[in-house]
Image (spheres, helix red, strand yellow):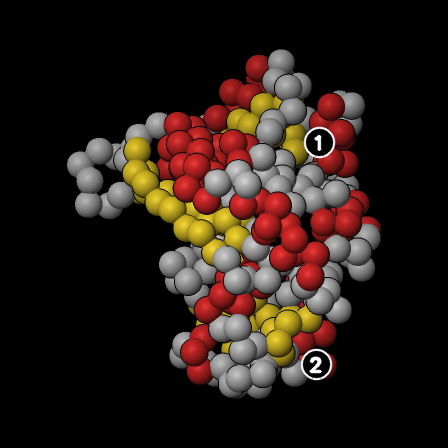
């Protein structure tokens, strides 16, 4: 959705810690927030009026002085397997021992759970850098489909296998663009509410509530995917599927539920997951994480 009020818009480009230190893993940089802190600070200091983020990069707990005013219509939230060697119709066609390159523990653990016979290596950098690296390595990489589409990086030479969310749960907020402003800036807030997509906003609220309750900016792999129950007569009925895993992919726990209140739905599922697996299991997950080869 676009709304034209005849306003002049100036784009302020801000380089985040995550962009500037692409050779360092996100977990080493501090986890969630490494792609948004500097952008948020520009709004807080009044150098900018609004902040535009990939919703998946936002920490699960909002800053008190900022207001998440809009989530625009959501793009494809799925991950896909990309490579330059061969077309795949299923992830089960990947030969045993194939090299999978990813810096995402969420993607790595879910693939390792389904295909423990694959070999993994770390991959960092922006999309263009990652594509160049997998071409050189002859590797396969899981990537967000929306990133390939937004940057127009699909080509006849690049083979892309979309993965259904039941095989690869995306990161909370993946595929969504979130727009923040200062909480006390009523004129800007009013403008941004006009571009808000209600369905995308509800989905992102449910997924972020799950993360927040789980305590995850979490150092463990988590995934969350909410969507409207299409068979329901209630337009706001959401279905939410969530995942918590050990980094080595040996333990993956998934839960799902439906509800109308997105925050309650995400909160209840997080508590249910923790009750089902037991808080005492989390140290075991972390112990498994320590044993993973990070080369």
Can you see residue 4?
no
Q: Is residue 43 visible?
A: yes
Residue in front for this viewpoint, 134 or 74: 134
**Quadrant assignment, res 61:** top right
- At 55% from the left and 41% from the top, the residue drawn is 280
In which quadrant of the rendered image does the N terminus lie? top left
Q: Which numbered dot is residue 217?
A: none
**Residue 136: image location, x then y, percent:** 72, 81
Give the image location of residue 2, x and y in percent.
48, 38
Foreground label between 1 and 2: 2
Q: Where is 38 relative to 125, above or below?
A: above
Marked residue nearer the N-terminal end (1 or 2): 1
Name the residue carrying label 1: 40
Which quadrant of the figure has residue 125?
bottom right
Q: Is residue 53 above or below residue 254?
A: above
157 w.r.t. 214: above or below: below
**Rendered-image quadrant of the C terminus:** bottom right
């Amino acid at each position: 959705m676009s709304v034209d009020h005849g306003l002049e818009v100036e784009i302020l480009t801000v380089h985040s810690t995550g962009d500037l230190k692409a050779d360092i893993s996100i977990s080493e940089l501090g986890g969630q927030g490494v792609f948004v802190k500097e952008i948020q600070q520009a709004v807080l200091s009044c150098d900018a009026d609004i902040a535009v983020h990939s919703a998946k990069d936002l920490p699960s707990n909002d800053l008190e002085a900022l207001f998440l005013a809009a989530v625009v219509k959501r793009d494809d939230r799925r991950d896909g397997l990309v490579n330059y060697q061969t077309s795949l119709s299923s992830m089960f066609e990947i030969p045993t021992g194939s090299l999978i390159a990813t810096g995402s523990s969420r993607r790595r653990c879910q693939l390792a759970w389904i295909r423990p016979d694959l070999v993994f290596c770390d991959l960092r950098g922006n999309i263009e850098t990652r594509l160049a690296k997998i071409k050189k390595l002859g590797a396969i990489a899981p990537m967000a489909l929306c990133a390939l589409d937004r940057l127009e990086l699909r080509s006849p030479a690049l083979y892309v296998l979309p993965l259904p969310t039941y095989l690869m749960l995306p990161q909370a907020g993946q595929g969504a663009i979130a727009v923040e402003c200062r909480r006390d800036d009523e004129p800007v807030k009013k403008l941004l509410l006009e571009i808000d997509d209600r369905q995308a906003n509800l989905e992102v609220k449910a997924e972020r509530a799950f993360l927040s309750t789980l305590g995850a900016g979490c150092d463990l792999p988590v995934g969350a995917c909410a969507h409207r129950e299409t068979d329901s007569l209630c337009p706001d009925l959401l279905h939410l599927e969530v995942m918590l895993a050990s980094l080595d992919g040996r333990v993956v726990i998934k839960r799902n539920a439906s509800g109308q209140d997105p925050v309650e739905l995400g909160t209840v599922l997080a508590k249910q997951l923790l009750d089902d697996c037991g808080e005492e299991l989390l140290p075991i997950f972390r112990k498994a994480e320590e044993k993973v080869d990070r080369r």
